[in-house]
Image (spheres, grey):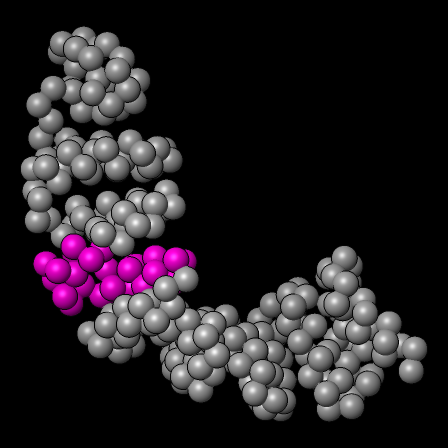
Amino acid sequence: MKCPECGIENNESQKYCGNCGGPLGGASISDLFEAAFKSEARGDLSGALEAYDRLLEKRPKSQEILFKMGMVCYDLGHLDDAIVKFRKVIEFNPRFIYAHFRLGLCLYHKCMIEEAIKSYSDALSTAPDFVPALLQLGIANFHIGRLEKAIGAFRKVSESSCSYTLAHYYLGLAYERMRRTDEAIQQFTLVSKENPKDPSTHYHLGILYKRKFMRDAAIGEFMRAHQLDPSDEATIEELSSLQQK
């Protein structure tokens, strides 16, 4: 019997292909799910998508199958297909928060920022404390310059029980852009305690201390940034400028 997945011939008595592990003959729902999971586990996303597609033929209104297909399409970079799948899930179940969230990620990567913001907001309307959606909502608003809204989202993340250091980093960026220097320093200092090896954090601290005319502190931060990333030209320029004064 020829495997429908890889085309290799197998014995008639075999239930699964000896080459790819795919189901042979009239595959059941459980067989197809197993084939999809095995394909994903070995990194064969195209094979997984084929198995899910066959599952969808059997269960065309299955939210689970549509969602999994959307996830695989997203991982393959097929964003348009993923968007179609996630929207179909939402059509069947408007309260499926992960579908709204994943749809938002797809739209954001398509530079459809307003649409992404709506998707994150839709997820949060059902689950207001869903931290991944809050973080991405903040990033999307930051992307288009809505700094107050971005700060509001990042604050909610930073005040939650989750240890999302990235929220503090983006808070620092937003405060820096708004010239709220002391608040920016506070956030970047928190980030540097969590990860002292991030050159970008030290660079921004250097810029902020320079803004406050704290020359020695600025040089110290730029030196740390330079040690961590010796090739960064912006850091070299800032350090050289301060050391010459």
Relative depth, front residue between 163 and 62: 62
Q: Residue furthest right?
A: 244
Q: In the shown orientation, is residue 99 left or right of residue 219? A: left
18 in magenta? no
Residue interval drawn in magenta: 86-110
87 in magenta? yes
Q: In the shown orientation, is residue 132 left or right of residue 188? A: left
Rendering coords of residue 235 (x, y %): 76, 68
Say which quarter of the image contains residue 60: top left
The residue lying at 60 percent from left, 68 percent from top is 195
The residue lying at 26 percent from left, 37 percent from top is 49
- Determine whether 197 is above or below 50 in the image: below
Q: Is residue 159 visible?
A: no
Rendering coords of residue 171 (x, y %): 51, 80
The residue lying at 17 percent from left, 10 percent from top is 1
The residue lying at 58 percent from left, 74 percent from top is 191
Say which quarter of the image contains residue 146: bottom left
Q: Main secondary structure of the magenta part?
A: helix
Rendering coords of residue 187 (x, y %): 57, 82
Q: Is residue 63 visible?
A: yes
Q: Quadrant of the C terminus?
A: bottom right
Total marks placed: 0
